[in-house]
Amino acid sequence: MRTIEQVKSIKRVLIDELNELPEDNAFGDSNNYDRNRLHGWIIDLAYIEEYGAPNDQHNDVGFWFHEESWSPLSDYEQSINDFTEYERLLRYAAWLNM
């Protein structure tokens, strides 16, 4: 089971992602589906943040929160971890070059 800090962290990432999502994708198609999906995840995460558990155990956020099964939210979380590690390596490389 995830902690409330992890819930807050992924919620911040999804809010940033939603704010940066353009109206249309590179192919000229609408991003409404992605926008609605992010909205739903953010609402579910806010519910967990407020009440300590998901309101639906069988949706993407419920699976992610209980770590029971693969969820698309895991991709976001893995991307955050990869970026953090990459950033740490870049900082170390820059320090070594000084």
Image (spheres, grey):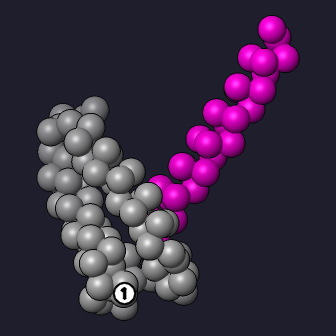
Q: Main secondary structure of the magenta part?
A: helix
**Of the residues shown, which amino acid type is indicated by label 1?**
Ala
For residue 93: magenta?
Answer: yes
- Relative horizontal placement of residue 44, taking residue 73 as reference (left or right): left
Q: Taking 65 as reference, is 20 above or below it?
A: above
Identify the residue at the far top of this view.
98
Q: Position of residue 89 (x, y in %)?
A: 74, 32
**Residue 72 position in % (x across, y down):** 44, 66
Crowding at mark 1 (Cα within 10 Å: few <14, some 14-19, many 20+): some
- As for residue 62 lying within the magenta part, the answer is no
Judge whether 87 appears above or below 12 on screen. above
Q: Residue at x 54, y 49 (%)?
A: 80
Q: Nearer the viewer, residue 65 or 48?
A: 48
Which quarter of the rendering shows the N terminus? bottom right
Secondary structure found at label 1: loop
Magenta region, residue range: 71-98
Q: Quadrant of residue 39?
A: bottom left
Residue 12 in view in this figure: yes
Compared across the picture, whether 33 is left or right of 69 comes to left
- The quarter of the image holding the C terminus is top right
Total tally of numbered discs in the picture: 1
Q: Is residue 69 visible?
A: no
* Residue name at image x 70 percent, y 25 percent: 91
The residue that label 1 is drawn on is 53
Residue 42: x and y, percent?
Answer: 26, 64
Residue drawn at 37 percent across, 76 percent down: 61
